[in-house]
Image: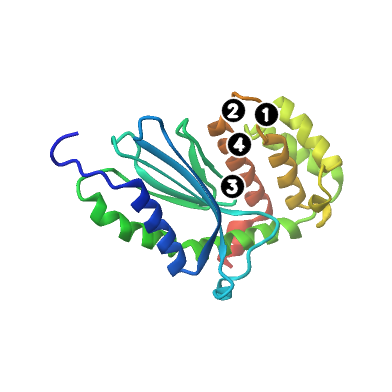
């Protein structure tokens, strides 16, 4: 790659992320990494939560996982990236998305000097971003559909916007009528139950999974529900 190419080691990348999480009061509950066969690309994901001694950030919500995804390369084929969300797609087919926020930096000269600071600055925003996600999901739980058919209409609109395929729409309607998990009914006929109906219908099956399409449809659903509930206006109030 030339005499100015100075790869930033994957192990150091992960260590810098872990140390930054520790500094802002988060612990890693589980983590998983994959390096491609030529050792040029890294993909990983961490399930994270506030540490017991950092509860001023609020307790972890048992109803969903806060996930941090990361990836990068030595051959400049990928930027160094972090993505934070309640659902994160990180896979070797180059899909990478987080529904709360993400950061990225090109693999350029002196990256090894710049990236630790960029990681620290990004991780420092996690408590703020996670709190906003919690507030949004609370709004979903509070929002009640007037009747089951109003939820059907919302699912059809999500389908029209590209958030569901025809087959997934049928499964989402079934999940809305008869949820597979009792926990999804805890807040009644709410936007939270509708979100779970959609995400359940989006679960991949088989060996040929289009993760990028799943991420795209999840984002469409989340955007539709946020607009329906008025999340942006209520957070700004």
Where's residue 154, x and y in %? 74, 41
- C-alpha distance separating marks 1 and 2: 7 Å
Quickly name the residue at label 4.
217
Report which quarter residue 20 is drawn in. Answer: bottom left
Q: Earlier in the sequence, mark 2 or mark 3?
A: 3
Report which quarter residue 124 is drawn in. Answer: bottom left
**Which element is circle 1 on?**
loop
Where's residue 80, x and y in %? 35, 45
Q: Dots 1 and 2: beta carbons under 8 Å?
A: yes
- C-alpha distance separating marks 2 and 4: 13 Å
> Looking at this view, is 2 or 107 the one in front?
2
Q: Residue at x 70, y 36 (%)?
A: 157
Where's residue 232, x and y in %? 58, 57
Quickly name the residue at label 1.
205
Tell us which disc is closer to us: 1 or 4: 1
**Which element is circle 2 on?**
loop
> Looking at this view, is 55 or 97 the one in front?
55
Crowd class of label 3 (few under 14; some 14 to 19; many from 20; radius 10 Å): many
Quickly name the residue at label 2.
209
Tell us which disc is closer to us: 1 or 3: 1
Quickly name the residue at label 3.
87
């Amino acid at each position: 790659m030339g005499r100015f190419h100075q790869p930033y080691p994957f192990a150091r990348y992960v260590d810098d992320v872990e140390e930054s999480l520790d500094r802002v009061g988060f612990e890693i509950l589980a983590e998983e990494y994959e390096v491609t066969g030529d050792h040029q690309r890294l993909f990983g994901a961490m399930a994270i939560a506030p540490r017991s001694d950092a509860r001023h950030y609020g307790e972890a919500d048992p109803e969903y996982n806060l996930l941090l995804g990361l990836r990068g390369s030595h051959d400049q084929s990928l930027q160094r990236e972090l993505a934070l969300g309640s659902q994160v797609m990180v896979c070797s087919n180059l899909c990478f998305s987080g529904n709360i926020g993400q950061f990225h930096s090109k693999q350029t000269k002196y990256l090894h000097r710049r990236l630790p600071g960029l990681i620290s600055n990004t991780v420092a925003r996690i408590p703020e971003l996670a709190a906003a996600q919690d507030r949004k999901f609370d709004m979903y739980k509070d929002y009640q559909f007037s009747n089951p058919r109003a939820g059907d209409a919302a699912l059809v609109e999500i389908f029209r916007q590209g958030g569901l395929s025809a087959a997934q729409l049928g499964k989402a309607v079934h999940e809305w009528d008869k949820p597979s998990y009792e926990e999804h009914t805890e807040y009644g006929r709410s936007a939270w139950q509708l979100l779970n109906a959609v995400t359940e219908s989006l679960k991949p099956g088989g060996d040929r999974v289009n993760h990028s399409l799943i991420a795209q449809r999840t984002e469409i659903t989340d955007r539709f529900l946020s607009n329906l509930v008025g999340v942006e206006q209520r957070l700004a109030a």
